[in-house]
Image: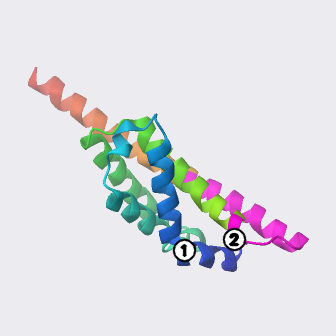
Amino acid sequence: MVSTKLVRLIEDHWDSIARSSVRRIRACADLPHLQHMPESEVHQAAQRTLHNLGYWLTNNPEKEIAARYQEIGRQRFRGGMPLHEAVRSLQLMKESVLDYVREQVFIGSGVEILAQQELDRVLGHFYDLLTFHLVKGYEAALRHEHTMAAAHR
């Protein structure tokens, strides 16, 4: 079971984590499309994911995650964002979350170490699921565009 204390820390400080994600994106030369994305859009993405993290992790609402992140994948495709940038943005957000927790939490006991390791594991699984559904939505939009283009030929 993932630590409620650590999840609450993330939920309560999602804004700081979002700012960290923005800094990471702006610093990454391999993400030209993301570097020009409005900061408010990155903040909204972080808020959607992190502000209710406890719900996402404990209720396992995979259908909701699938619907939301497949739509985000379709939006990223329609917006002209390369798939690798969309995936990297999720990776950078996850890194920001984990780094924030490591910076804020003093590890003083074996139980706290185990709690942090469990959070790392659960967040890894969660972000893998987000990435899977984002890619699935992106690919669906790509296939749709190819089908429409073929029909017009």
Residue ID at (52%, 68%): 16
Residue ID at (16%, 31%): 148
The residue indicated by pointer 1 is: 13
Q: Is residue 78 visible in this depiction of the protein?
A: yes
CB atoms of marks 1 and 2 within 8 Å: yes
Q: Who comes first in sequence, dot 1 or dot 2?
A: 1
- Side of 126 relative to 152 (left or right): right
The image shows residue 86 at horizontal and vertical percentages of 42, 44
Residue situated in front as seen by the camera: 108 or 23: 23
Where does the magenta region start and end?
A: 103-127
The residue indicated by pointer 2 is: 104
Would you say residue 113 sits in the magenta stretch?
Answer: yes
Q: CA distance from mark 1 to mark 2?
A: 11 Å
The image shows residue 66 at horizontal and vertical percentages of 43, 56
The image shows residue 114 at horizontal and vertical percentages of 82, 66
Badge 1 marks a residue whose secondary structure is loop
Residue ID at (59%, 69%): 57
Instruction: Identify whether 126 is placed above or below 74.
Output: below
Q: Main secondary structure of the magenta part?
A: helix
Residue situated in front as seen by the camera: 24 or 45: 24
Residue found at the far top of this picture: 153
| Amino acid type at mark 2 | Gln
Q: Quadrant of residue 97?
A: bottom right
Instruction: Identify whether 36 is placed above or below 63.
Output: above
| Amino acid type at mark 1 | His
> Quarter of the image containing the C terminus?
top left
